[in-house]
Amino acid sequence: MKRIFKFLSSIKLAIILLIILAAASILGTLIPQGRSLEEYTARYGMLSGALIKLQLTTLYHSVWYLALLFFFALNIIVCTLTRLSAKLNRASRPKVESEAKALQALKNKDRIKRNAPLQAAQAETVARLKASRYKIRTSAAGNRVSLLARKRIAGIFGSDVVHVGLLVILSGGVISGLTSVRQNLEMREGQVVSIPATDFSLRLDKFTTLYYPDGSVKTWISDLTVLEGDRTVLTRKVEVNRPLNYKGFNFYQTSYGYNWDSPAVEIGAKKKSDPAYAKKVKVKVGERALLDDKDQLTVSVVRFLPDFVLGEGNQPETRSLQPNNPAALVEGFRGGEKIITGWVFANYPDWDQMHSANAKDKAAPTDLVFQLKSFEAGQFSVLEAAKDPGVPLIWIGCVLVMAGFGLAFYWPTWEIKAVFEETLGKTDIVLGGLAAKSRESFAVEFEAVAADLRRSK
Amino acid sequence: MSESTLFGLAFILFCLAALVYLAFQFSKKSSLANVGFWIAAAGLTSHTAALIFRTISSGHAPFTNMFESMSFLAWAILLAFLIIDRKYKIPRIGAYILLIVIGIVALASTPLMPKEATPLVPALQSYWLWLHVSVTMLGEAFFAVAFIASIMYLTAKEPEKKDKMDSVGYRCVAVGFPLFTLGGLIFGMVWAYKAWGTYWSWDPKEVWSLITWIVFALYLHTRIVMGWKGKRSAIIALIGFLAALFTYFGVNYLLAGLHSYA
Ligand code: HEM
């Protein structure tokens, strides 16, 4: 039992664990994580089964990686606790008594003979050390007085504060892993979505996409209203990097999408025989609109595909929901008679695929050419709703870690010890100094103190 | 003066400072070390002005593409060196630092690196971009100085020089480690949380930052608790800087495809 405890508290274990954690983490960046079985089979062939069994494809959530983290946490707890009581004792009940011999074995040391009684020499020393902000304790035994002067004692707890901070971060991570929820929300303008397991719902009032002059997206703005029942609680603009926080939930703007249900399409018409002829009309998919009064020409849009491809069996379909290759299937009518039909493409205005609607003379060229001039589709907002109760602990832990760094590296604890001994009205002062950090600056200060004591009358 | 004039002027001053530091290396005249310091400081000032000009004209932080980011890294390394040199007097590594700075600036200036400032995608439009990148790079810059000090330690012969390089290496880590933790890990987590709602997603860049951080934690513990010093410390600091370098370049180029920051 004792041996296990000792092992758990050892820095050796810490070093082994850190090396294994680093090596495992590297492995996780070399093997793509969380992909499909097909992808692993294509990449690793026979090996893929073994990789999946060893959880190397979800490495950071694997049982063994979590076990490593668990032992790492245990190591920190045991190691920090076992050292803490000694440190607390050192801070609150230090040993003031010292031996002149012991002081002379220290790295910083000095010996001063003062032509003054002990009390005067001691008072001078205390005053000098106080001037340098040392806190002082003394103890007397017979004709000998010991003095302990220290400053910035909190510095010795720097490492403990860091370690506690790390534990707080790890526990925040555990809580996040067990309790966080997130959900994708695709919202159209006017739509109300109730948030599961809460008493409120969210309404998208307006969705705006702003573009840079070069056409790339600058930002998406969702005007959101929080509703409790029918009551409006608050309205807010949500953008990327500016989430809305309400009752523990955060709502993030993540992306956008097009609503292709009934886009409005602008169709243009030309005549090969008459270059001056140009007509335009806006029409919704599934509807029919008058193009040319004189000719009694009407046009209807039967179908619209944002990203046209010819799929299986040469059937038109859309590859994505992005308007990469917008195409419309249009029909032209003269009076009541359908005269022409075909696909038109926004990106290829001169692509002439129109043919006669009459099955008999399909091959016959037509004079009329339609073009897909433009289209308008509503955009919907893609938001993410997330609730993560572990987050506050993460931030608290981060603050502790940084505070601990400050203490460990920039709040060096310095100690000066002195032993005074009086013989025949003269006092012998032996000084010794200890600094675990910033030894050079400490040596300078130590020497200045000794020099001042030597100089004083 | 324009950004490119100032940038060019900085480059010339860096080259001059490198020459002066090299001259110091051979002659050991301390006045030369002083001259080298001030020329390098003038170069840094000019480089700073160039970065400010770029920020004003592009309207965003000067580290959003590879050219800008490398130029900023060179700036940070020189700044870290000048700070450490003022405190601990290490002109002997000046020549190497300036050669690295010149190397990075030269690499950043090759035609392969796109230079025009492009508009920022939505996720990058945040003041956290400033905090996250600048503090991380400053931390990495101190690791770079520790790296040079470690190489000097390993190659030096005189014990006095070795001691100095060992303690300079530690000082740099004592500054770089908290900065890297704050900028790379903590500010990174805060920003990720603000932008995407998860503070940690095991993205390769995040994981490599963590690995870098673990290496420097090993440096500190072997040194403080186990009393490792000198050679072994120097080697760990070397590995740590290489890990930081891989986090910076390697993840983008070698592990590309797995990684997609918006
Ligand atoms: C990667 C995670 C860790 C970090 C970032 C960390 C950080 C630190 C820091 C900053 C110090 C102070 C160093 C100095 O005074 O210069 C320290 C000291 C120390 N750490 Fe850690 N630590 C980690 C993990 C561990 C673990 C797992 C152990 C378990 C054995 C441990 C044991 C110690 C000990 C014994 C000290 C000695 C200093 C003292 O007692 O004040 N550390 N650590």
Image (cartoon, coloured by chain):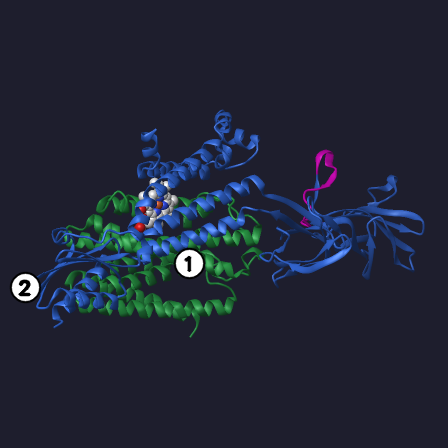
Chain colours: A blue, B green
The residue lying furthest to the front in this view is: A142
* Circle 1 crowding by C-alpha within 10 Å: few under 14, some 14–19, many from 20: many
**Residue A214 visible in image:** yes
Looking at the rendered structure, whether the residues under marks 1 and 2 are on a common chain is answered as no
Image spot of residue B148 (x, y percent)? 27, 53
Of circles 1 and 2, which is in front? 2
Viewer-closest of A442 and B75: A442
Q: Say whether residue B60 is left or right of residue B149.
A: right
Q: Say whether residue A82 is left or right of residue B95.
A: right
Q: Which mark is on residue A424? A: 2
Image spot of residue A103 (x, y percent)? 15, 53
Q: Residue at x 83, y 44 (%)?
A: A364
Q: Report how far apart the C-alphas of labels 1 and 2 lie in the structure.
A: 62 Å
Image spot of residue A448 (x, y percent)? 18, 66
**Residue B218 visible in image:** no
Magenta segment includes A323: yes
- Magenta stretch in the rendered image: A311-326
* Circle 2 crowding by C-alpha within 10 Å: few under 14, some 14–19, many from 20: few
Give the SS element for disc 1.
Answer: helix
Q: Which residue position is annotated with label 1?
A: B135
The three-letter amino acid code for the residue at tag 1 is Val
Quarter of the figure with the N terminus of chain B:
bottom left
Q: Say whether residue B222 is left or right of residue A236.
A: left
Q: Is residue B255 above or below residue B36?
A: above
The three-letter amino acid code for the residue at tag 2 is Leu
Q: How many marks?
A: 2
The residue lying furthest to the left in this view is: A424
The image quarter in which residue A13 lies: top left
Q: Chain of mark 1?
A: B
